Image: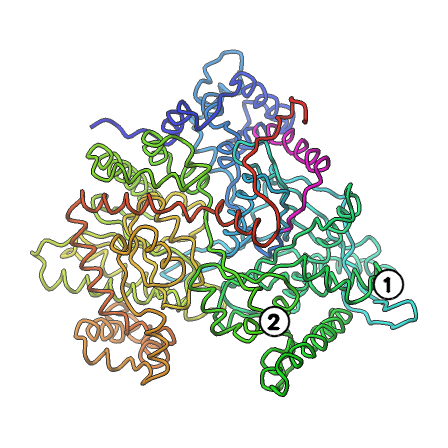
Amino acid sequence: MSKPLSDHDRKKQISVRGLAGVENVAELKLAFNRHLHFTLVKDRNVASKRDYYFALANTVRDHLVGRWIRTQQYYYEKDPKRVYYISLEFYMGRTLQNTMVNLALENACDEAVYQVRDAHIPYIMSWILLGLDMEELEDMEEDAGLGNGGLGRLAACFLDSMASLGLAAYGYGIRYEFGIFNQKIVKGWQVEEADDWLRYGNPWEKARPEYMRPVKFYGRTEHTPDGVKWVDTQVVLALPYDTPIPGYRNNIVNTMRLWSAKAPCDFNLKDFNVGGYIQAVLDRNLCENISRVLYPNDNFFEGKELRLKQEYFVVAATLQDIVRRFKASKFGSREIVAIQLNDTHPAMAIPELMRVLVDEEKLDWDKAWDVCVRTCAYTNHTVLPEALERWPIDLFQHLLPRHLEIIFEINRRFLQYVASKFPGDNDRLRRMSLIEEGGCKKVNMAHLCIVGSHAVNGVARIHSEILIATLFKDFYELDPHKFQNKTNGITPRRWLVMCNPGLAEVIAERIGEEFVRDLDQLKKLLKFINDDAFIRDIAKIKQENKLKFAVHLEEHYKVKINPQSMFDFQVKRIHEYKRQLLNCLHMITYYNRIKKEPNKHWTPRTIMVGGKAAPGYHTAKMIIRLITAIGEVVNHDPVIGDRLKVIFLENYRVTLAEKAIPSADLSEQISTAGTEASGTGNMKFMLNGALTIGTMDGANVEMAEEAGEKNLFIFGMRVEDVDAMDAGKGYHASEYYNRIPELKQAMDQIAGGFFSHKQPDLFKELVDLLMHHDRFKVFADYEAYIKCQDKVNELYKNPKEWTKMVIHNIAGCGKFSSDRTISQYAREIWGVEPSLEKIPAPDEQLK
């Protein structure tokens, strides 16, 4: 059998078809050489692998900078409406390869790497002597892990789409010194390590000290005849770092601006007395801690003062930037700003904008409020009560006293309006108030966002329906036109062209390359559903990706797996609602069945689970320990052999996802119906040729609609079933435990120490949770899940029918491009029109 083509060989083939442009390879080589010698000041004899990465990154960045400057000139001339996407998280991953794809530089860079036998470039000759290739260089790049999971990665996909659709859009967030922790598995347990992602420097960012802005905290308010003054404050400086965001081959390069906290030069020095100088300088760290670390919680609210400081810091700095740019624009009187709040984390933008307009710009309240509401829009990402932000009034009073006054005034006027619409309905007033009464009064940030925005959206159709029927029902009844749905999407540049070039090539051969810009084109693949050659090509690419990932697993996890086995993935944050425990019960059930009938023909499986648990989330950490414990037993049982393997994928992150997802056969999306807002991993797996086993939750519902429900493995309770159970007799785990022998056996094994011989009661808490306190009804879906997994096994035995189902799924992915999502935000919320127009290159005249 011929050796599988490497990813880079594949990309070169695609490039011939126009998926990558041709650049002057000699010029790239010279630029690389120049950066190695002059930027990094390295002699070829001492240059390391990392030096070569930085030389290549700087070479590629050179191609961004001209387009970046040209884009700003273009926006200044045209003065379009600006979109500001504010998010506490941007989970970017790596930048080098994505930039090469979007600038059509990949082919040329490959040539510059592989044709290094040019004797005139001695520094690149040393590259060959080191035995390096492009993938090794790409692996030197640190992930920019400035996010927890779905919300932060969505923001990153949106930036790519906004640039690719020609929107004058800016991403604003925080430049965390430490991103999401690195996860190590030690003796089966998660251990966290700090993510010092900036230790070698970041070639993609540019500090912009000329745009540094002061941000105020603490102090008190003074009500004077000239208006309200916020005085005696502590000032922290916000230093911006800009990262270029290239669109897909349209010469547009937008900006992500991340703020870093700096102490002002006089911080504490004005107060110090004799001998206090050293301490005053050391105390500068206290205010610089604001941008030190990303809070590692996903779908959980932790009401810490530092977190509220982060939330205010990013919006205060950003709004100063927005106002500055607005005042400098050519047509300053027009409505040229849209602000999108990515969840409630940037909710302080609403009172802060009011403070700027009323206290500083001297607008009257009604005019300022009209501007605020027309400018802001809010995206909700969860219905889980523990995730909703509610900040104590006392903390607000201490940290942001003026903003608390503004929130009280917003609430007073809002409740007056509600009372006029629903006279005498005091309970409604209580439910809708921005202030939650009780022992400790709190500000409900979701309510603040709804009241202060002109549009509120959920992130999948079923999620948006649940919002207006439950959580935001009162607000919907008051103002139904405010509420919309914007189903999430993913960028096909990173999640297909970049991470799965083999599949991209096979698709391009059949339908051309336009699908990269217009993912709806994938529907054309249905014409090839019975084409034996196409079916073979799709299956072959999948097998090559599996072999590649198997090698990666062997190298990094020291686990040898069967590449002919079904690759079954559940990769996402560890959370009870995502039901990794249901997956565990299937692992144990399948193990027990093989043990019971070892001579039967079983469909071989490699079950891989990956994801991080929030450091303070004890149950999630116990779930990881259970998975590793099951693996310890299953993987060393000689009766099982290579028919079942259970692997926990350590340190799941964007870069690991890019390797894992193209190799997947089965994607587990098994949350309790009504709990997962959307999901985006589900879309990535679907686009890369995996089949989905899942509940009718989040975007799974629309995936089933697009690909045909018969082409997904759908099981379990629907939202109506869950609601009916809650409204009726309730959920009683013991009924299922007593009725289903295989479930009882699995639970007894966990409880009895079968997977923890040295500590028989290790999983006592998990057993107690499942038997008595399970909000997410794992046992209620167990039977349907196991039966559905049996169907998966059966179909996998028929590779041709399996692959035909895969083609149906890939062909149904068009809707799940973030280009479609962003086009809908643009037209229906921001009031701007997306464009596929290519602007003139830096060496061409602007029209």
Residue under pointer 1? 272
First in sequence: mark 1 or mark 2? 1
Residue under pointer 2? 447
Name the one closer to the observer, 95 or 361.
Answer: 361
Name the one closer to the observer, 684 or 373.
Answer: 373
Q: Amino acid at mark 2?
A: His
Which of the 4 image quarters holds residue 422?
Answer: bottom right
Q: Which residues are magenta?
A: 60-84
Disc sitting over residue 24 in the figure? none
Q: Amino acid at mark 1?
A: Phe
- The quadrant of the rendering that contains the C terminus is top right
Residue at image location 52% in from the left, 63% down from the top: 297
On screen, residue 59 versus residue 507, left or right, reads right
User: In the displayed structure, would residue 598 be above or below residue 4?
Assistant: below
Helix, strand or loop at label 1? It is: loop
Magenta segment, principal secondary structure? helix
Which of the 4 image quarters holds residue 531?
Answer: top left
Q: Position of residue 807 (x, y in %)?
A: 28, 43
